[in-house]
Amino acid sequence: MSQVPPAPQTRVGGVDVELNGINSVAAGERHGRPRDLFWPWFAANVSVLAVSYGSFVLGFGISFWQATAVSVAGVVLSYLVVGLVATAGKRGSAPTMTLSRAAFGVNGNRLPSLVSWLLTLGWETSLAAVAVLATATVLDRLGAGGGTGTKLVALVVVVVLIVLGGTLGFRVIMRMQRWITVVTAVLTVLYIAFAAGSIDLAAVRAVPAGDAAAVVGALVLVMTGFGLGWANAAADYSRYLPREASSGGVVLWTTLGCSLGPAVLLVFGALIAGSSQDLSGRIAADPVGALTDILPTWFLVPFVVVAVLGLVGGAVMDIYSSGLALLNVGLRVPRPVAVLVDGALMVAGAVYIAFFSADFLTPFQGFLITLGVPIAAWAGIFLADLSLRRGDYAEQELLDPRGRYGSVRLLPVATMVVATAIGWGLVSNSGADWLTWQGYLLEPLGLASWVAPAGGEAGYWDGNWAYASLGVVVAFALGFLAVLLGGRGAVARQEGR
């Protein structure tokens, strides 16, 4: 952000490591301007993985123009949530999941912190695995082989970059993301220029339009795959801003930094996927590596650089926030140690995806939907609670269950549990055997019917609304309305009004 040291540091092997954890940032350490938030958020979201999302969106059976509207609206609206949550960081100078204690109570907040930790851990694992798969695919096309040995080398390089950035902390991340922003922005523009030649406008125009259920399903996928996946980390990077920084500026620069790259890349991805059904199918197995098929050989090295940097940029911020969420769950270790714990779990997950899973898209969508429901409920609750507050957070009492925020606030905790339960009943995950229990409200409400074929074949939902993921929207709305209508008195008492 600026030249002022942003956090207490300790030197380990001649390298500065940030010491701040879930505590509030001291007044003397707060600095910078809202526009500084553009750099880390742009770097974290400019990944070419967003191009593959264009294929995922079209996979709902909608037209290119529907996909364009869904992509832009889903990206901007979901990242607006991130921008709004980021204002809490300026008002409380603490990580997102620490500030969430004001809504849920110091101990009640362990529930959303656990969900947040699982979500960020899943994202960093997925991004690391995709980076490994993309690197192996590119090296294979270059004749260097894309087998197990290549994947292992790629895994080591990717993991070291991610864990090192997350462990060193805020100052390193802010500097790293500025460079990643510049490099990836330039190379991404070049990628679009080279890949544009493979667009078949006639094929794109021929893609038929989908019904309302398909449009809603695609919109929810975009929202869960982009903004809602970052909402629980939004304040982690705005917490170093001075209290007098503009709240509108925080919302603007966070939303712009997050949205600009994905909005362009999603639309371009829909053009590419709509031009070739074969390419769209390969993207499901290797979301980034499959995109190399439309590039000249000499551009493959720059492509893998932009792909890996973009994915690492997102994963570094994920593992940093994941470590903070793990501390809020209750792990009593220094922040860098929490990051190392996350790193070990990330490696295990990335190894499974890169070496043993034949299909990336199915487990990834199952992960997004399953955790997208409770995190949507949390986001609704958090935003409602934030909107009811007139003053800043009482920093020290966020760490004390005997303080004004209490140990457990029953309304928000119960609301998150109930909203999640209802939300899971309105989503479907028939592609993953261990998630087929979801969707139990679809049939009673007449939205879909479960088909169990004879002969031991896998069952499936019949009905387009089964795949609209309505549960995510319902969970958010229930969380927001319940706390907005029922939490006013509790917030007023906390603030002495």
Image (tube, rainbow, N blue to C red):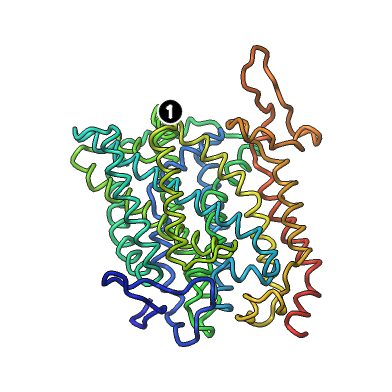
The residue depicted at 33 percent of the width and 81 percent of the height is 3
Label tally: 1
Q: Residue furthest bottom?
A: 28
Residue 488: quadrant of the picture: bottom right
Which is more toward the observer, 383 or 29? 29
Under mark 1, the amino acid is Gln
Could you tell me residue 455's position as x and y percent?
64, 12
Could you tell me residue 123's position as x and y percent?
48, 50
From the viewer's perspective, tell me whether residue 367 is left or right of residue 130. right
Decide if residue 325 is in sight here.
Answer: yes
Q: Is residue 454 above or below residue 209?
A: above
Q: Within 10 Å of the Cα at label 1, are there few (<14), some (14-19), or many (20+) other Cα atoms?
A: few
Q: Quadrant of the C terminus?
A: bottom right
Which is more toward the observer, 497 or 35? 497
From the viewer's perspective, tell me whether residue 113 is left or right of residue 1. right
The residue depicted at 76 percent of the width and 57 percent of the height is 415
Which residue position holds label 1? 277
Q: Is residue 184 above or below residue 443?
A: below
Could you tell me residue 408's position as x and y percent?
74, 67
Q: Is residue 135 above or below residue 28?
A: above
